[in-house]
Amino acid sequence: MTIILLKHILNVLNIKKGEIMRKIISLISAVIISAVSFAGISNADSKKPIVIPTHNWSSQIVMAYVIGGIMESMGNNVKYVNADSQAVYESIRIGDVTISHEVWESAFGKSFTTALDKGGLLDWGDHEARTLEDMGYPNWVAEKGLCPGLPDWTALKNPDCAKNFTTPDSPDGKGRMLEGPQTWHGDLIPQRVDALGLGDLWWVKFAGSADALWAELAAAEKEGRGTIIFNWTPNFTDADGFTFIEFPPYYPGCRKSDGGDGKCGSPRGWLKKAANYKFPKTHPHAYTIFSQLSFTTKQVGEMAALVDTDKMDHKDAAAKWLADNEDVWIPWTKAGM
């Protein structure tokens, strides 16, 4: 009854804004977690902290605090560390980080597999959500007729299309594609553009962060120009309307980095979890929860939207998600008891 009452209070208070509101959300979430523990669900494993990494996109950071909140509700200690999204799997393998909760196949599959093959890193299973990471455009680009023929990639060969995507920094009047940070995929997209013969009409710029991608979406719509950006699903843009370009189908070995010609798009893939091999021994109950934990496309998108659409702080977004979804996560805390 306490949890239900606090959830109702949270929903009512959420219509207000500002720093005071954010502090109230965090406080209420802490009370909810304490109430869960007091009710007998607490089952702390160890004083040794569970080290959870944070990267540089919204759903990953919010989910880190969501999972950390679940672990804390059992009485466990949790430590958050900012980590490189490619190097984190080696960090898990050697024990500096405990878990990874958003392993995207297309972007991080190779780094994950390399660490897995060395030993010390465990595959902890997939989320229900399936993924796609590639270049695309907001649906209003098609509605305005800025590039007839999309989403077929061959529409990009039309000079009249490219000119609708130029920006002040475009060299030689080329259309711009905005990639994510270069640390995510290296030169994958520039190599694809050149391999498909699009280099004379298009150029690729790397964004400094995920936030820069969303800022570009808003700016392009305001300015009435076309935009092609790197994006992924699940994400908050699923609800807003976003279409991925249909490049030639992906197949193993088609990318330049794998010895191919680079003339292929991205695969639909898994969204995995990973953990250090000692995790089942140091935190047996937490490990059981982490094994069962699985988020859907809708749930991952909701976590991202709390930050990217509702403009909440990552920690407060996690607190709200936990408060609104006790029916999802509280049963996980009872696993193995």
Image: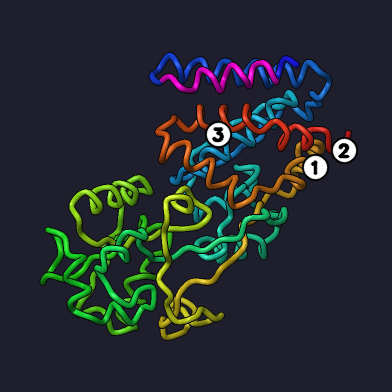
> Mark 1 or 3 closer to N-term?
3
Q: Between tags 1 and 3, which lies in front?
A: 1
Q: Is residue 334 above or below residue 268?
A: above
Q: Which SS class for mark 3?
A: strand
Q: What is the C-alpha distance between the residues marked 2 and 3? A: 25 Å
Q: Position of residue 96 (x, y in %)?
A: 60, 42
Residue displayed at 67% across by 53% down: 127
Q: Quadrant of the C terminus?
A: top right
Q: Residue at x 27, y 61 (%)?
A: 227
Which region is colored magenta?
4-16
**2 or 3: tag closer to the N-terminus:** 3
Q: Which mark is residue 336?
A: 2
In space, the residues marked 1 and 2 are separated at their CA atoms by 7 Å
Pointer 1: what residue?
288
- Kindly identify the amino acid type of the residue bearing the numbered disc 3: Tyr
Give the residue type at disc 1: Thr
In the image, is 131 to the left or to the right of 199? right
Where is residue 301? Give x, y as percent.
53, 47
Q: For this rendering, which residue is in front, 263 or 217?
A: 217
Which element is circle 1 on?
Answer: helix
